[in-house]
Image (cartoon, rainbow, N blue to C red):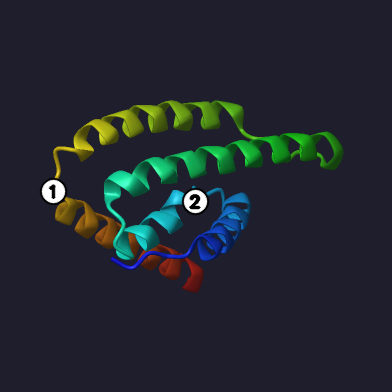
Amino acid sequence: PRHIPASVLIVMAALTGCAGGIYGIGGGAILSPILIGSGRPAAEVAPASLACTFVTSLGGVLTFTLLSVREGPVAPNWPTGIALGIGGIAGGYLGARMQSRLPDTLIRRAVGILAIAIAAQFLKSGLS
């Protein structure tokens, strides 16, 4: 497996965090496929990705909350955020429990298909 140097990961994470702040996406949506594609096992990538997403999300919520005090109506939509957070916690728990029971090849292929499908959707919406 090819391992990405820590310095490259830091730059990629910073760019992903910026995109996450602009578009409201989790860093794991971008970094996980890259890390899995570079040969890291899903059992290593998933916890790191979830921790990254949590920290990035927390930073985004705090930033938007502080901006709402000075800049106006940019505060997080709390009911939606809480509902998504509850769903994310439940899904994260179930996914972590299921991961050890699934073959690594299946996880890699599913991540690849999902990444392609998401990229196609972004491309379609960006071109229309």
Q: Residue at x 19, y 38 (%)?
A: 100
From the image, state whether disc 1 or disc 2 is nearer to you.
Answer: 1
- Observer-nearest of 118 and 44: 44
Any part of residue 117 in sight = no
Q: Residue furthest right?
A: 70
Q: Earlier in the sequence, mark 1 or mark 2?
A: 2
Q: How many angstroms separate mark 1 from mark 2 (CA)? A: 24 Å
Residue 84: x percent and y percent? 46, 32
Q: Quadrant of residue 78?
A: top right
Q: Residues within 10 Å of mark 2 (few under 14, many from 20)?
A: many
- Observer-nearest of 51 and 91: 51
Residue 103: x percent and y percent? 13, 48
| Numbered mark located on residue 117 in the image | none
Q: Residues within 10 Å of mark 1 (few under 14, many from 20)?
A: few
The reply, left or right, for residue 3 in relation to residue 68 is left
Q: Residue at x 29, y 62 (%)?
A: 39
As helix, strand or loop, the secondary structure at mark 1 comes to loop
Q: Quadrant of residue 71?
A: top right
Query: Badge 1 is on which residue?
Result: 103
The reply, left or right, for residue 127 in relation to residue 100 is right
Residue 47: x percent and y percent? 38, 40
| Numbered mark located on residue 27 in the image | 2
The reply, left or right, for residue 26 in relation to residue 69 is left
